[in-house]
Image (spheres, rainbow, N blue to C red):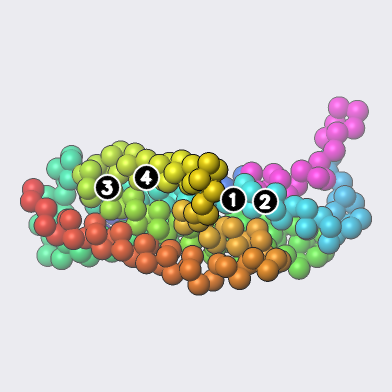
């Protein structure tokens, strides 16, 4: 029952984020073939068949430049709907009268949100990839076929971070503001370190996206170990922190 409750409370954000990702991705895929002639709009598929390989290579990074933040935003907004957000309005009292461990509420919500993040990153990317393959006849799209799972990986630690901050701040708004503040503070710190101090700090949870855009270069070997391990650790560590806080919270 709680899984259904999580879906009902997150479905508005889910559909909004899905449309926000899918619409621009499809529009960019169709843009080269949309022509205007004498005030009339038409679609010319020949733009895709002149050089299918070049068209795929040109459009794939453009599509991903629109979608690269989909997992990150999904993690932030869905994480703010965690059970910790019900502490401030007092609705958590009813939940905790159910014959279930408090930890189950945290991990059920986490599981539902992970599934939604995967759908938000896979559906728009594969729609664009399928459409591009049909138009060009070229289905060799390594960037687009790999991208959804890497974009989802970026969203998982952000989901965990927002879940933890929501438990700390006892509200959805507070969790979203504080998790966003942590990310912004790190971005500013990284700019200072990379610029004036000439230090090489990695982008926050951005290893998968960086690896994706460096897909055909020797630098791509940097991603699979360090970044992946960091992401998995933080994606699980933060929900554990939220679980601990909620386990010892009195209402």
Distance in Å between CA atoms under marks 2 and 3: 32 Å
- Seen in the picture, residue 187 relative to 137 is either above or below; the reply is above
* Tag shown at residue 166: 3
**Observer-nearest residue: 44 or 60?**
60
Distance in Å between CA atoms under marks 4 and 1: 22 Å
What residue appears at the point 34 percent right and 39 percent down from the top-left corner? 177
Would you name the residue on which mark 1 appears?
67
Q: Residues within 10 Å of mark 2 (few under 14, many from 20)?
A: many
Would you name the residue on which mark 2 appears?
63
Would you name the residue on which mark 4 appears?
182
Distance in Å between CA atoms under marks 2 and 4: 28 Å
Q: Earlier in the sequence, mark 4 or mark 3?
A: 3
**Observer-nearest residue: 63 or 122?**
63
Distance in Å between CA atoms under marks 1 and 2: 6 Å
Q: Earlier in the sequence, mark 4 or mark 1?
A: 1
Horizontal side of 11 relative to 121 (left or right) equals left
- Seen in the picture, residue 218 relative to 116 is either above or below; the reply is below
Instruction: Check disc 1 and report its element: helix, strand or loop.
Output: helix
Distance in Å between CA atoms under marks 1 and 3: 26 Å
Distance in Å between CA atoms under marks 4 and 3: 13 Å
Q: Residues within 10 Å of mark 1 (few under 14, many from 20)?
A: many
């Amino acid at each position: 029952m709680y899984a259904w409750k999580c879906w009902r409370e997150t479905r508005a954000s889910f559909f909004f984020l899905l449309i926000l990702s899918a619409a621009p991705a499809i529009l960019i895929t169709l843009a080269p073939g949309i022509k205007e002639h004498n005030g009339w709009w038409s679609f010319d598929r020949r733009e895709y068949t002149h050089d299918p390989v070049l068209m795929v290579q040109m459009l794939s990074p453009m599509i991903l430049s629109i979608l690269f933040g989909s997992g990150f935003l999904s993690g932030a907004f869905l994480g703010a709907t965690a059970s910790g957000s019900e502490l401030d309005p007092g609705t958590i009292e009813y939940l905790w009268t159910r014959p279930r461990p408090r930890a189950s509420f945290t991990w059920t919500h986490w599981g539902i949100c992970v599934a939604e993040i995967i759908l938000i990153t896979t559906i728009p990317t594969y729609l664009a990839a399928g459409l591009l393959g049909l138009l060009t006849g070229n289905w060799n799209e390594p960037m687009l076929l790999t991208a959804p799972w890497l974009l989802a990986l970026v969203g998982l630690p952000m989901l965990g971070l927002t879940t933890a901050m929501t438990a700390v701040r006892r509200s959805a708004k507070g969790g979203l503001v504080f998790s966003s503040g942590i990310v912004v503070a790190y971005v500013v710190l990284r700019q200072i370190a990379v610029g004036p101090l000439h230090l090489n700090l990695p982008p926050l949870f951005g290893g998968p996206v960086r690896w994706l855009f460096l897909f055909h270069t020797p630098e791509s070997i940097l991603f699979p170990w360090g970044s992946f391990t960091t992401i998995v650790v933080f994606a699980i560590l933060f929900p554990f922190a939220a679980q601990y806080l909620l386990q010892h919270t009195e209402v």
